[in-house]
Image: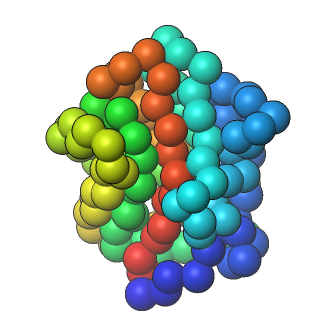
Amino acid sequence: MFDAPLRSLGAKVVVATSNDENHPSENIIDGNTKTFWMSTGMFPQEFIIRFAEMTNVSSVTFDSYNVQHLQVEKNTSENASHFEFVAEKEFKHTEGHLQSNSISLNGTTATHLRFIIASGYDHFVSVHRVSVQK
C-alpha cells in the first residue's frame, strides 16, 4: 500500500472531459483534498489517469463532492484505448463535506484507469483526490 500523491509516482491525467483553468484535472492526483478538478456540467464526465508503468491496484480511494454514480475501467496497453469494466459504485450524498469512498479493484493490473462519473447530485461535481492502494 502507498499513500504518496500519484503525481509524485509519475502518474498523469491524460484526458478530462471538462477544463477549468482555476481547477485543472492535475489537481486530482496532487494528493491535496483542498485542490480539485470541477466538471462544467452535464453527464457523463470522465478522466483517465496513466501510470508511469504497469501497476497492481487493489483499490482506489475517491474523494469528491456531489458524485452520485461512478464507473471504473482499466486498460493494460500503452495507449488509452479498449478499456474494460472493473467496478462501479453509487455514492451517498454528503451535504457540506467531501465524499470519501474506497472502491475495490480486486488486484487489477493497469496502465490506465478511466473514471466515468455517470451522474451527480447537482449539475457540477468536483474530484479532490484519487489515491491508489496496491
State the count of labels.
0
Question: Based on the displayed image, in which of its 4 quarters is residue 101 positioned?
Answer: bottom left
Residue 66: x %, y % from top left: 36, 33
Closer to us: 80 or 20: 20
Q: Is residue 12 above or below residue 48?
A: below
Residue 41: x %, y % from top left: 53, 16
Left or right of 95? Residue 41 is right
Residue 109: x %, y % from top left: 47, 67
Is residue 108 shown to the viewer in this render? no
Q: Is residue 86 above or below residue 54?
A: above
Kindly give the residue lying farthest to the top in the view shown: 42
Q: Is residue 105 above or below residue 107?
A: above
Kindly give the residue lying farthest to the bottom in the view shown: 1
Residue 38: x %, y % from top left: 59, 34
Left or right of 44? Residue 22 is right
At 66% from the left edge and 65% from the top edge, which residue is drawn?
30
Kindly give the residue lying farthest to the right in the view shown: 21
At 51% from the left edge and 45% from the top edge, which residue is drawn?
127
Closer to us: 84 or 50: 50
Is residue 104 shown to the viewer in this render? yes
At 48% from the left edge and 23% from the top edge, which residue is drawn?
124
At 48% from the left edge and 67% from the top edge, which residue is drawn?
131
Closer to us: 4 or 71: 4
Q: Is residue 99 above or below residue 51?
A: above
Question: Based on the displayed image, in which of its 4 quarters is residue 52 positioned?
Answer: bottom right
Question: Based on the displayed image, in which of its 4 quarters is residue 50 positioned?
Answer: bottom right
Q: Quadrant of the N terminus?
A: bottom left
